Amino acid sequence: MRLHPLSVSLALGLCPFAALAAPDGAVDATAPALAEFDRVVVTATRTERAIVDVPNTVDVIDRARMDATLVRDIADLFRYEPGVTVGRNVGRFGLSDIRIRGLGGNRVRIQTDGIAVSDAFSIGSFSNANRNFVDPDTLKRVEVVRGPTSSLYGSDALGGVVSFVTKDPSDYLDDGRDAYFGFKLGATTADEGLFANATAAFGGARWSGLVAVGHRQGKETETMGEVGGEGSARTQANPQSTNGRSVLAKAVFAPDARQRFRLTVEGNEDDVETDVLTSYGFQAMTRATNTQVLGDDHQSRVRVSFGHEIDGLSWALADAVDWQVYRQDSRTRQDSLEARNVPATQMTSALRDRRERSFFFDQRTYGVQANARKTFETGSVVHTLAYGLDVEVAETRQKRDGLRTILDTGAVTNVISPDVFPVRDFPISDTTKAALYVQDEIAFADGAVRLVPAIRVDHYRLKPKVDTIFREDNPSTQVADIRKTRVSPKLGAVWHFAEAWSLFGGYAAGFRAPPYNDVNIGFTNFAFGYTAIPNPDLRPETSDGLELGLRFAGRSAYAGLTGYYNRYDDFIESTRFVGIDPDSGLMIFQSQNVADARIWGVEFKGGLDLDVLAPALTGWSLRGAAAWSRGEDRTTGDPLASVDPLTAALGLAFDGDTWGAELAGRFAARRDRLPPASTAVGYRETPGHAVLDLYAHWTFAPGTTVNVGVLNLADRKYWPAGNVPLVAAASTTFDRYTAPGRSLAVSFAVDF
């Protein structure tokens, strides 16, 4: 792995941090100031551990940080986390996936309270089910584990884990408090958004509960494009109307100080109506002229879980046990309407045509999780053993439907070429995932050295159910059951070689089971001469990751530098051309294991309390982060488009007793490593940018806080990495993918 000059400069930068942290040479690593690496996390090891004792790169965003930066969605959530990117489908479907170190989609596990959210799936221009199923106002903390994490979380943790942790009654009921009520109102100008949420908690000796409700509404998120009107030349955002709701309810029963029973009900839904003006006008592919294109999209997720935690046990195999059972339902419905004028041909006269399409993607999941922990000693070595099981059963249904109406004659048909509706692009699929894992945290040398071996065995089964809809569209397609078993090992280590310094790193394996839509995809289009066929021989996608890092956690400073190298094998390329059927003459497409990729890079995160320089700077602090990475498709030697260029964030903040402010910068280098295009023109490079944001908060009365943020303070035109697809270099609509100009966000919160 070649080192970038950035990594060298960051490594050299660690030494000044150490000097500034303790000019007299005495560093107290347990002091409370700037305790970024002292934060307790759970996701990385499934046990409560301070980041300084975790052999992974972990990011934590807590409730206070979300409030201070006025987080409204997942894009806001990761705005200052270089190396973590949120994708956006500009035009209609909005926020899509979360990429970690260049890997996204269903290759990153996204979970809420340990339960994975539903999959993403898209096909064609009118169907795009995403994974944006969380309201940040229901969260108390977000943890991100970068790199392969299949040894603890199995399939879909190929690129990492994003773990959303929801609020609990105990977060509001402390110091003997038996009731709490708070509400928040806010607005944003970038999308003319309004939001409101309220949280109530109550508690007694044994029972406690919490209810949090939220509402949000707005319009399209602005771009800095200047071309309006209708048609493909438009660069302004398409008009939208958005509204959403969320609810989180918890009831907790603690029969004694050692155990807690918890019932959770969580729901989130969003509705978006879009006037897709960019699709109006003449369409070269269909030769028709669109006079109206409307989208009406709805998505929802509901989860019910019941769990039990008990600690202080004296069992031979466990000191603490927790388990939960759950059911989760997610649903995406997207309705599209096209009104078009079709020109006359030699065979047909001109006509007015209305096409109505509906797309459905539903998942229902049942699961059980159980975890146990046991601490014991063998001589001078302390073991913290964690083990458990995960079982998940899911049913996935996808369907596309449609009607075509000839307005001049009133004729109605379910044929919209090349489809005869309704259709399924894969059969109804039952998937079962069952896994056992075990991890041992081995501490010796008085805790200065910690080894963390782990292993997980996953069994995956796919069982398709062919119904009439799928069979009518695929009369000869033979679908397949598959069974796969995979062993994922991991070995991590942490060495506290000095009072405030530590080295960490190790090896981790990752995998992703073959998806149902790739194994059993099926459709045939005789008019265009092609067919897609299943592939029961698909192998799991796999990864091998190496990581090495250096941390400093001092009295007034912290810093961490990490280098990583990930190798990905057997990536699945969906619907790849594989040949011609000699009997029918149809072109054959099939999903296959073809890709071999490498992603490597360097990441830095650090902070400094400036009062170490002078007492007059008490309350002032500096924090920063940077990520540099490279990705390569080893089968072709081409760069990976999903890997971001050098990105960084830097913030200068003041926190006083009643008010505070922060000037935060976001920076990105030019995106110039792009795969070759199919034409000589090539793809458009994305310019680099430097954007400043300003935040302030004021607690002008007990429990009453105003937060204000001015984003893109200098009103710069820039293109966020998650917004920009591969665009032809000669494109005249590149401004369509720009972020908003200067915008304001404000919230008013009251706690009782």
Image (cartoon, rainbow, N blue to C red):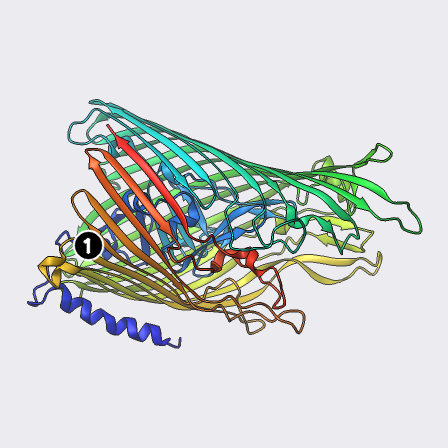
Does the rendering let one see residue 53?
no
Q: Quadrant of the C terminus?
A: top left
- Depth check: give the residue in front, 681 or 532: 681
Image quadrant assignment for residue 359: top right
In the shown orientation, is residue 509 left or right of residue 522?
left
Residue at horizontal 21%, vertical 45%? 659
Query: Is residue 171 at least partly visible in the picture?
Result: yes
Quadrant where the image shows the N terminus: bottom left
Q: Give residue 24's quadrant in the image.
A: bottom left
The image position of residue 130, as x and y in percent, is 53, 45
Q: Residue at x 63, y 69 (%)?
A: 677
**Place of residue 554 in the rendered image (x, y in percent of width and height, measured from the top left):** 16, 60
Instruction: Give the image location of residue 363, x and y in percent.
Output: 55, 37
Image position of 54 (left or right of 428) = left
Residue 212 in the figure: left or right of residue 363: left
Q: Give the number of marks.
A: 1
Q: Check the image and report above or below for 644 versus 747.
A: below
Front residue of this view, candidates 423 and 661: 661
Q: Residue at x 62, y 46 (%)?
A: 481
The residue carrying mark 1 is: 34
Q: Is residue 368 left or right of residue 254?
A: right
Image position of 259 with respect to 226: above or below: above
Which residue occupies the foreground of this view, 429 or 711? 711
Number of other residues with Cα within 10 Å of mark 1, as a class: few under 14, some 14 to 19, many 20 or more: some
Indicate the secondary structure of the residue bearing disc 1.
loop
Give the residue type that dot 1 points to: Leu
